[in-house]
Amino acid sequence: MIKPSYLYIVVVLLISSCNVDQLDVEGLKLSENTGLYAFPIGETTYQLMELLEDADSTLAIDTDENGMISFSFLEVDTIGLAEESDEQDIDLNLFVRQSVDFPISSFNIPLFETFESGSFLLENPELNFTIKNELRMPLAIGLVIWGEKLDSLGELDSIPLNIYDAFFDLSDTLKSISNLGLTDTAAVSSTFITLNKTNSDFDQFLGKTPETIYMKLSMVANADLDTGVIKVFLPPDTIPDREFNAGAQIFTSMELELPMSIDLADLAVPVDLDSISVDVDVATLDSLQLRVVTYNMLPFGALLNLQFLDASGVVLYSLEEGFQVLANPPLNSINFNVKEPEININQVWLTGEGIDALNDTQTIKIIMTLNTTDGAPNIYTPLLEDYTLEVKISGKVRLSYEL
Amino acid sequence: MKKIIAGLYILICSFSALAQEGTSFYHLGSATMQSTAFNASYFPKGNFFIGLPVLSGISLYANNRFSYDDVVIKNGDVNEINLDKLVSSMGTANSFSLHGTVSLAHIGFRAPSGLGISLFANERIATDFIYPKEVAELLFKGNGDMVGEEINIGKVGASINYYREYGLGLAYELGGRLKVGARLKYLQGFVNLSTPHNFEATLKTNNESYQLEADWQNFQLRTAGISQFSDDAINDEDLASYFISNGNTGFAIDLGLEYKLNGYYALALAVNDMGYIGWKEHVQTSGLSDSTFVYAGVELQDGDIIDAISSVSDKFKVDTTYEQYTSFLPANIIGSLVYTPLKGTDVITTLNAKILQGQINPGFGLGIRQTVSPSVIVSASVTKLPQQFFNIGVGFAAKLGPVQLYMATDKILGYSVPSMKWAQVQLGLNFVFGGSGEDSDSKSGKGTTSTQGSYGGGKGVQTYSFHGQKIKAKKYEDIYTIVPEMSKAKPANYSNEWRSHERFSKGKVFINSKSAKSNNVGKKFKKSPSSGADKNQKAKKNNSKTFSGKWLSHENYSKQKKGKKSKPKKQKQKK
C-alpha cells in the first residue's frame, strides 16, 4: 500500500506547482523585430576588351599578334594653302618667310573622361603625321599641342605637350617638310613625322589623361629663308628653285597610336549611379554591409570608395577609406598572362551617418582607384584582350521593423 | 563519472526530444479496453466489455515548445510577443501537437478459446506541426547569421488529420508466455491538411557572395475536406452526409505482443497506426514544382532588376491541382521492459518512437505500477515528453461493480496557465462484466511477471490447464471455477514433493481460475493460522524448483499455490 505520507508529498507538490495566474492577452502584439539579412545584389564577368570598347567609341581598338590591345585615332585633312593665305592676306607668290595659320583642330578621348585623377602612363604612345605636299616651295610646320581636362572642381585644366628641341630642325621651333622641286615629276612629296616620348613628353602628357587634345598647326612658306629676306629670281641670272603653284594642296593625316602597355598609379575611375531612390524606410536600417567578391584576371589591383551625393552634387557621406576590391594577380613575366585569378573578398559596413545620408542621396559615386604592379614604379604591363574580371556584389542589412 | 552522467543525460534528452504522450496510462498495462490502443495484446481481464459514446474514453494532449510566459513580455501596458525570446526558447527540433480521441463505442468479449475480440469506433484528431529552430531563425532573424549553413526546410512538416476509425481487435495468449494482438482499422477521413512525408527542401546562403541556393522536391500543402466549407453550393445536408460517410477511406493496423522472459521480466512491443488514408473528396494540392535554383542577383551589365525578380518569382509560382493523394498516419512504436521485483509491483521502462512526417522521434518513460487492490491499479511515471523537462505522471483504473473508471495524466505538476506548455489527460468509463476484481499478474507474487492482466484466467474461459492436463470448467461460483472431479492417478513424472500435495486432489476439485490468482482468495488464507503466508511462499519456491526447466505460467503457478494451501479451506467455506 502507498504510505499516506507519500500522498501528502504529492498533494503538496501538486498544489505548490499550480497557480491561478490568468493569461493577459489584451493588447497583445508583436514587438519590434531585428533581423540580419544577407542577399546578393548582382554579379557579372567583364571582358577587358568589351570594357574598353564601351569606354571609348571614338578610338579604334585593335590587338597585335600577342593579343595586346591598342587604341588608335586617325584624322585626315586637306589643306588649301592658297585659300587660307588669301584669307590672311598673304601673297605666297612673294618668296619670303611667312606663316599661314590654320584653325585649331581637336579631338576627344572619351576613355580619358572616365579617369578622374591619377596617372595613366603608356609605354609607347605615338602621334604620327603624314604630310603629302604638292607645293613646290620649301615649307615647314609649326606645331603646338595641348590638352584640357576638367578637374574635380569642374574647372578646365590645360595640359601642354612639351616638344623637345630635337624634334625641330629649323629655327623658331619649326619642322621642315619635304617639297617637290620644280623639275620633279612626282605629284607629291611625303613627309613622316612622329611625336613620341623621345622627342616630347607625350607619354606624360597622355598620362594626365586629357579628355580633349588640341592642335594648332601653322605652315611656314619659305622657311629656309631668314625672316624678312625676299628671294627674287631674275632669269637668266638666277634659276628659280621654287614656285607657288596655287592649285596645289597639302594632304595631312594624323594618327594617334596608343598601345595599351600601361603603368597605372592611383588612377581614379569614378562611376556615378544616378537617380538613386531608396524605397526602404531607412529608419528600419540599423546597418548595411556592402560586400564585393572579385575573381581578378586583370593586371591591376583596385581600391573602392563610395560617396553619397545629393541632388546638388554635395557629398553627404564618404567612406573614410577605400577597401580593396581587386587584388593584383600574379603575372607571367614573359607573356604577361595572368596565372590564376586573384580572389578578393572584402566588405564594408555603413553605419549611422551613411545610412542617414541615404535619405537624401541622389547619386552614389563609386570610385575605383587602380594600380598596376602593386605600386612598383615605371613597370609597364600590357593589357591583353583575354583579361577578365568577375565581380559579385552582395549586401547584408540589419533591419529593425514591426511585423 | 561526471562525463558519464552528462553523457547519459544528453542521451536521454536527445532520445526524449519527441516522445509520445500517454505513458502513464500505458503503464497501467492491460487495465482497460483502451489499453489495446497502446498494445493490441493488452486485452483486459473480463468477459464482456461495453463502452458508451464519449463516456468510455476521451484523450487529450497538447504540447507546444513554449509557453505564454516564454515569449510575452510586458512593456508598460502593452503585452508584446518578443520574437527574440520566442526563438531562443526553441530547441533544435520543435513541434506543436494537439491530439484528441473520443471513443464512440466499443464492445468486446472473450471467446471460449481465450481469444479476446473487440469492436470499436473512435473519433480522432491529430494535429502536428514540426519545425526546426533554424527555420524559425531564418524567418524571424534573417539569414544573415546563417551564411554558409544549409537550412533544412524539409524538416518542416504539418499534419492535421481528422478521421474516424472502425476497428476489430483480436488478442490471444500462446503457450502462456506470449500474448499477441492485432487491431485492424478501417478509416474514414474527414479533414486533412498535410505536407508530403517525402517533402525535401534546403536553402543555403553562399558564404562567399551571399547568393541564395535552394532546391526542393514535393513542396506541397495538401488539403482535403476543407474546401467544401467555402463552397456555397454545399449545404448542411451535404456536410452531414460527408461526416457520416465519404470516399476518403483508408486502413491501418496495430500490432502488439508481450513475451515473458522469465519470472521477473517481460518484454512488450507494439507498432500502432501503421496505415494510410486515401483522400479523394474535396482535395486540393497547392505546391511548387520541383526545382533547384541559384539566385545571384541581377546581371550588373545591363541587367534588369525586373527580369531578375520575375525569373525568381517564376520559381515560386504556386500550382494547384485537385488530384487524390494518400497521407500516412503518424505511426508509433512502443517497447517496454517490465520488471517485477515485488509482489504487486511492476517497474516499467518504455522506449517509444513516433514516425511523424517520415521522421522518427524517439521517447522514454520510466514508471511503476502498483496493484493496490484487486479493483484498483495505479501507476506513476517519469516521462520525457516532447520539448519538455522530465514530468511526473500518474494513472489509475478502478472498478466499482461493472463500472470501471480510469484516468491518467503525464503531468501532475506545474498547472499554471501562463507558463503551461503542455497538458495530457486520458479518462473514461467502461462497463466490464465478468472477471471482476482481478489484479495484476504481479500481484500473485514474485516471479510472475507480465503487464497487468492474464487473459486465459477469466471466467469466460472454459478450458484450463491443471497439472499439465486440459480440463473443462463445469460451472462457476463467484470467484471459483468448478471443474469435474479429477482422477487420483498421479502423473508418472510427478516428484515426491509434488505427491506430498496429493491430498488436494481428493473429491471434487475446485480451481480458482482467473480469480485463483487473486489475492482476494490468497489474502484470506494468508491470515489463517493454518495456512500462513510464509508457508505459501515456501511452497511456491518449492514448486518453482520442482518445475524448473519448464516455464511456469502464472496461471498454473497460482493454481498450484491455491490448491495446495488455500483451496480446501475456501471450498469448505463455500460449502
Image: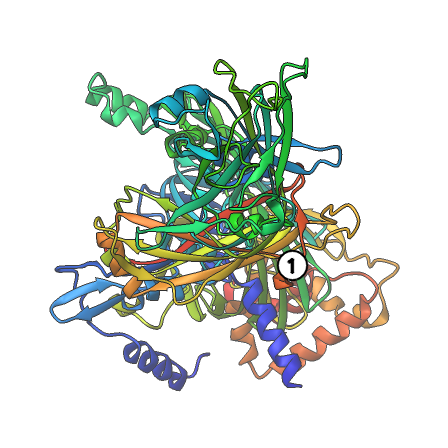
Q: Residue B54, how many percent across, how many down?
A: 31, 44
Classify A256 as above or below B545. above
Who's the residue at 29% across and 44% down the image?
A276
Rendering colour mode: rainbow
**Label 1 belongs to which residue?**
A378
Q: Residue A64, how many percent across, how many down?
A: 71, 33
- Work out whether residue B572 or residue B207 is closer to the camera in this orientation and state it: B207
Q: Is residue B157 visible?
A: no
Q: Quadrant of residue B85?
A: bottom left
Would you say B481 lies left or right of A183 here? left
User: Tag 1, which secondary structure?
Assistant: loop
- Work out whether residue A229 or residue B104 is closer to the camera in this orientation and state it: A229
Q: How many badges with numbers are in the image?
A: 1
- Work out whether residue B82 or residue B411 is closer to the camera in this orientation and state it: B82
Would you say A357 lies left or right of A218 here? left
- Work out whether residue A379 or residue B419 is closer to the camera in this orientation and state it: A379
Who's the residue at 53% across and 32% down the image?
A222
The quarter in which the N terminus of chain B is drawn is: bottom right
Who's the residue at 49% across and 67% down the image?
B383
Q: Count residues near mark 1 (Cα–Cα under 10 Å), then give few for <14, some for 14-19, many for 20+.
A: some
Task: Output the chain of dot 1.
Answer: A
Q: Residue B108, how many percent across, how many down?
A: 47, 41
Which amino acid, mark 1?
Asn
Q: Quadrant of residue B188?
A: top left
Who's the residue at 67% across and 40% down the image?
A384
